[in-house]
Image (cartoon, helix red, strand yellow):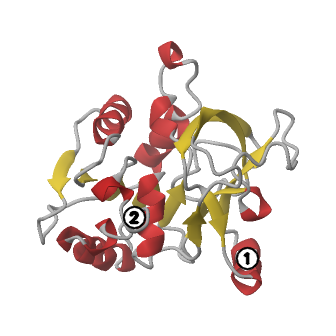
Amino acid sequence: MKVSVIVFPGSNCDRDIKVALTASLGSAPDMVWHGVTKLPETDLIVVPGGFSYGDYLRAGAMAAHSPVMREVVVRANAGVPVLGICNGFQILTEAGLLPGVLMRNAALKFICKDVFLKVENANTIFTSGYYQGQVIRIPIAHHDGNYETDCETLDILESNGQIAFRYCDKMGELTEDANCNGSLANIAGITNHSHNVLGMMPHPERQIDLLQGGTDGKALFDGLLNSVV
């Protein structure tokens, strides 16, 4: 399985995702600089977290116009799986691959802690390592993770099974207190209509080893190995 990790100026989770992918897939991904216009042959594209372009203008807005993103969009529209984590989620919305926008956290503060997520749709290539309704614990680290969209789009996300993860408490309840950043409907991660693009704010690559406090994130990457051909 061949994987490409896109690296932008300001990416700071690209090496983390490289370690996570290597641990699950058995081989290191290609690290692709944002300035290239062509991607190597690849079965999966990952847009990692960080602060691309220093989050100037708007988180992800400048990175979405990097030369490589034109090719990412083409590959995604052709069915190649694309995973965007944290800043990667922001970039995918700015590039038009996912609906909605990531706004400032409701508390207007950077949040860095472990949170609980409920797996809302286990029938995607990204979530096949989990079961429907499973509660997992994954770290977050963001300032602009407040997912918002219009009511019509929310209805489409709900009806098409595009909500992959929601913030919840340890019992799986979708409470206001568990909604760490104020996201609409407790949304933590969504897919596109075809379910081959996933954007999520939490960092599964930071939960792949017991030395990190848990392995709930590793199931995502292990599931990809079995799902992506």
The structure residue drawn at horizontal position 40% and vertical position 55%, both measured from the top left corner, is: 228
Secondary-structure class at tag 2: loop
Q: Amino acid at mark 1?
A: Leu
80 vs 208: above or below = below
Task: Check disc 2: other Cα within 10 Å, few if <14, some if 14-19, many if 20+.
Answer: many
- On screen, residue 11 versus residue 147, left or right, reads left
Residue reaching furthest to the bottom: 152
Residue for badge 1: 154
Q: Quadrant of residue 44?
A: bottom left
Foreground tag (2 vs 1): 2
Name the residue at 18% across, 73% down.
67
Amino acid carrying label 2: it is Gly
Count residues near mark 1 (Cα–Cα under 10 Å), then give few for <14, some for 14-19, many for 20+: some
Closest to the observer: 144 or 211?
Answer: 144
Of residue 146 and residue 203, the one placed in the foreground of this image is 146
The numbered mark, 2 or 1, whose residue comes first in the sequence reads 2
Q: Is residue 61 left or right of residue 9?
A: right
Residue 159, quarter of picture:
bottom right
> Above or below — where is 22 with respect to 201?
above
User: Between residues 147 and 223, which one lies in front from this camera angle?
Assistant: 147
Residue at 55 percent of width and 25 percent of height? 215
Residue 170 pos. (x, y %): 81, 32
Q: Where residue 202 sits: x, y (%)?
A: 56, 44
**Label 2, label 1: how far apart the Cα atoms are:** 22 Å
- Mark 1: secondary structure: helix
Residue 181 rendering spot, x and y as whole percentages:
69, 51
Residue 3 against residue 59 in the figure, above or below: above
128 on left or right of 54: right
**Quadrant into which the C terminus falls:** bottom left
The residue to which callout 2 is attached is 60
Horizontal relation, residue 103 to residue 135: left or right: left
